[in-house]
Each structure stands twice: as C-alpha cells, then as structure tokens.
Amino acid sequence: MRKKELLKLIKTKSEEINIKDFSAAIVEKARLLPQSEAIIRPKRKFYFKPSLMYSFTLVTAVVAFFFLYNPASPIVPQIEDVNQVVALSSVTAVSLIEFDTTLIDQNNTTYLSLDYVTLDVPVTTQIDEEIDDVTMYLGTMEKLLNSDDDFNYQMNTTTIDGYNNHLSFTAKDMLDQETDYTFNFNQVENQTDNQFTLQGTIEIDGIHYMVTAQGALNNPQQLQLHIEKDANNYIDINYEVTETTSRYQISVVENGTQLQSTNMVVKEINNRRSVYLDFIDGQSTGSYAFRLTEENQMRRMNISYYISGDTSESGEIDVTVDTTGATSQYAIEIRPQGRMPYMIEKDRGMNYHGGGPSSSLPGVSYI
C-alpha cells in the first residue's frame, strides 16, 4: 500500500471514533469539592467609651490649665534690700502684737433674723470657731494689701539716743490712712560667719517695742525677726523671699505660751497682690486667701476659706470698714457654702495706729 493510501486510511478510521466531551463534568465535580473561604474583615473603627471620654477630657483640661494659667514669666517681689525686708516684717509683727486677745473672751453674740426664717439657735459653722483668730490678722492684711511695695522707707544714719540707724516707713490701711513707723537700731556685722544682727526699738506714736533681727550679709531676702512687748509676750517671724512669693512663718507667744503659729505667703501676680494664711498650731486649722477689691467706690477685703476636718467647710468672707460710729468697725459678711449668710461686727481698734479690737463688743446678724 502506498503512503498516500495509508494516510487516507488513518484519517478515515479516526473520524469513525466518537471522543466524548468531559469538560462540563470536570467543572461540576470541582464545584462540589470542599473549598477554603477567604474572609476579609472590615476596617476597625475606634469609639470612645464614656469612661475613656471623661478621662480624656479631664487630662485635656488639666494640661490646658497649666499652659494657660502659668504665667510666661514669674512676677518677682520687688525686695531691694534688707531695709525693705525689715519694714515689711515689722508691719506684720506690730499689727499682731498690738492685738488684745483678752477681748475675744468678752465677745457677746446676738443673733438676729432678717429676710430669712431662722431657728432661735442658729446652726453653728466651723468658721464661727475661727473668726476671732482671722480677725486678729485683719489689721496686718489691710497694710500688706494696700501699702506701697517698699513702704516708702527712708534711712537716716545720724546718731541719736545711742542708735546709729533710723529706718522710717509708712503703711496704709483700707481707708488709705497712714501709720508711720521708726525703727531705731544698731547693726553688727560678722564677716566671718556672713551674718548681721540688728538690735533696737520700733516706735509708733510714742509706743516702743524691742526688736532683734538676724540675717545673712549676702542674702537680704531672708530674715529672722523678734519683736516683743515684754519677755513673755512677743512675735517671732522667719521671713524668706522666693522667685514669686514672700513667705512668713509666724509664732505668737502670749504670757509665755505659744498661742498659735501660722504660715503666710504674699504673692504678686498680674499686678494684683494676694496674701495666703494657713493656721498650723493652735485652735484654728483653716486656710485663707485675702484680696482687696473695690465696688461702688468702696474698698473691701475678700477672703476665701477652707477648713478641713471630719466635715470640711468652705466659703467666702467680705470685710468692709464702717466709719459711721464713734469708732471704726469691721463689718464682716460670712457666706459658708450651702449655709445661710450672716453678718458680724468687730471693733477695728485702728483709730491711732494698727491693731486689733479695743473695747466694743461685736454684734451678729443674719442677712
């Protein structure tokens, strides 16, 4: 058989064979096999829980407070030399030592009701137990808050009555009435120990108080001052100036017994002076902040207070000076938080120079 005939025979035989199409069966079988499904998770969104939202808000507020409240540059008290320090400390000590604490026991309290329905016996507040101690410092606060920074001091080195130095200075109260002080003293310097000592008397309207002061020669912004009526009645003050405050540690001794000790800080921020008082030892334990304000051409002392204890108490006190009577009076409005406000009056006892209550008995009224 020739090649051509052979190829024709092969072609004929192949066409006679029926080849089946299995593609559809293969696809269907593959579809029925187990498949591993790929799961694509949606992107997670973050939602604030209420507790997280509160914490975040609190932290933000605290951070904002420090950035906004903290001044860019601290206000440094203008203490130029030791004379200014002595003047400031002496004004504080004299106002305290002139306070007659025996009058506190003579206080006769009368409660009246105005515009409010009250019980015959009013609810006692914690400030009632401390207001006499606070009143003891009102004369000091008047002068610290309203006097010029340097108390307009003048120095005279003429020898008079055995004293080589005479420091005169002036303090102003809430009514802008002036009190003149003269500190007559001798100064001893110890270069080896870098210490100085001042010994002499402070004179106010013919009244003299013995004074001893000590400090460092290279740091006039620290001073220890002792001023006394006598050996058993005196005031000790440790005074220090920091970058932003004038700080006192005060001890009041009466009849040989420490009556109380306090910490007092003077701050000057944005040209506004404030004094902070903390009672440390003694009957009172509260913390007080004093500022001067003026409303309707009347100057008043605003006091914020906080008293801790089994039940803490806070509130506001406004003090004005009433000059309508024979002697000037402190008109004191007390507003304990959550309690009814009331008024008390105390004799200011500052007709001739700084001091505390004299002989009048205070009255109390609810407003």
Image (cartoon, grey):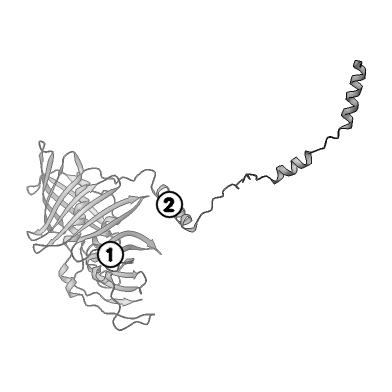
Q: Residue furthest bottom?
A: 120
In the displayed structure, 179 sits above or below 224; it is below
Task: Name the side, left or right, on which 210 lies relative to 243.
Answer: left
Circle on res. 295 = none
Circle 2 sits on which residue? 59
Q: Quadrant of the C terminus?
A: bottom left
Q: Is residue 19 left or right of residue 356?
A: right
Residue 196 lies, in percent from the top left, at 12, 42
The quarter of the picture where residue 310 lies is bottom left
Q: Position of residue 235 (x, y in %)?
A: 14, 57
Give the image location of residue 133, x and y in percent. 22, 66
Q: Nearer the viewer, residue 228 or 58?
A: 58
**Of the residues tagged 1 and 2, which is closer to the observer?**
2
Q: Which mark is residue 308?
A: 1
Identify the residue shown where x is 13% and y is 55%. Answer: 227
Q: Residue at x 89, y 32 (%)?
A: 16
In which image quadrant can residue 104 be found?
Answer: bottom left
In the rendered structure, which amino acid carries the disc numbered 2? Val
Q: Is residue 182 left or right of residue 131?
A: left
Task: For mark 2, give the secondary structure.
Answer: helix
In the picture, the quarter occupied by the N terminus is top right
Q: Nearer the viewer, residue 117 or 144?
A: 117
Q: CA distance from mark 1 to mark 2?
A: 27 Å
Label 1 amino acid? Ser
Q: Secondary structure at mark 1?
A: loop
Marks 1 and 2 in Cβ contact (< 8 Å): no
